[in-house]
Image (cartoon, rainbow, N blue to C red):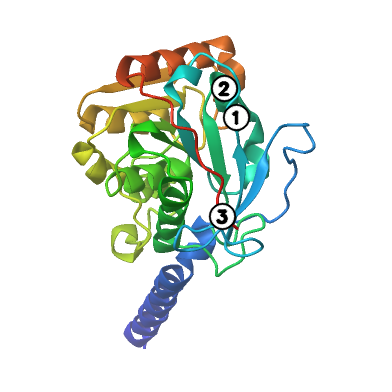
Amino acid sequence: MVYKGLLALALATASIYGAFCVGLYFYQTKLIFSPTSVLTQTPADEQLAYEEVWISPEGRSSPGNGLHGWWLPGLPGTLSARALTLLYLHGNSENIGANLGLAHRYQLMGFNVLMVDYRGYGLSPGPFPNEDRVYEDAIAAYRYLTETRQIPNQQLWLFGHSLGGAIAIELSTHRPAAGLIVQSTFSSMLQAVQLTGQYDWVPVNWILTQRFDSLAKVPHLQLPVFYIHGLEDDTTAAAMSEQLYAASPSPKSLWLVPEAGHNDVASTAGPDYFTKVETFVQQTQPVVAIQAPVSPVE
């Protein structure tokens, strides 16, 4: 009787464990992605010059439909002579409204900046996000810049913060660009999950389909890359940017910012942020003949 009782308990425990693992497999996107729809800040609130844009999956201008974003024209700055444009890919649990301050810093350096929300984020309609969909959305934004606005890829820089860093790395392995800036990102989703310690008792490597495996991709980069990370980041450890840096080919640079967390690197660094980014761009980006971006045809 004792044996049968123990066997029944073991079978029940195994069934519950198996059901939990199956649940994690099918609902992992809900655990990984946290899209927010409310825009807490807009360029109009800050009296910034901007253009509201809507981008179709094919990268065309599509007023009122597709991906929603803001085009911030570059202001006179150190990098103005290079006529550069920055594709800004934001992180999780936020949207372009929460990233306006950092995007404006790049605008002040002289970059034109395109900020865009993935489907399900901000005002961008669509299905719930997953890894493939955010990659597709980044490609649509890239095509909008290079095809609709006719920006040469040698004048286009990619920027990604946190989850956006993984998206920017993926994009840079498939589309040519002048350079890549990756801030506060992770080496892979698997390692990010493992570092939390919350799922040590389940076979995460078997269950996880949303891999975001940047560490496997960066050895194949063919453009300059600048990794930036706060040393006090308690969301993604700075050691993961160090791993990415070590695995990346040159030209590359790594800047670990003392006392900075996950979302306050630029504000903590102050003027040094401008200096570090501008220096890296100047060292790796030649001055080219200025070609003004064209306005998309509605």
Q: CA distance from mark 3 to mark 1?
A: 28 Å
Image-quadrant location for residue 244:
top left
Which of the two discs, 2 and 3, labels the residue nearer the N terminus?
2
Q: Quadrant of residue 63?
A: bottom right
Task: Between residue 232 and residue 248, name the one nearer to us.
Answer: 248
Of labels 1 and 2, the one closer to you: 1
Q: Amino acid at mark 1?
A: Leu
Q: Residues within 10 Å of mark 1 (few under 14, many from 20)?
A: some
186, 104: nearer the viewer: 104
Q: Residue at x 60, y 29 (%)?
A: 102
Pointer 1 or 2: first along the chain: 1
Q: Which residue position is annotated with label 3?
A: 297
Q: Is residue 170 left or right of residue 48?
A: left
In this rendering, the label closer to the viewer, 2 or 3:
3
**In the displayed structure, does residue 125 sit left or right of residue 218?**
right
Judged by depth in the image, the label closer to the viewer, 3 or 1, is 3
**Residue 266 circle label:** 2
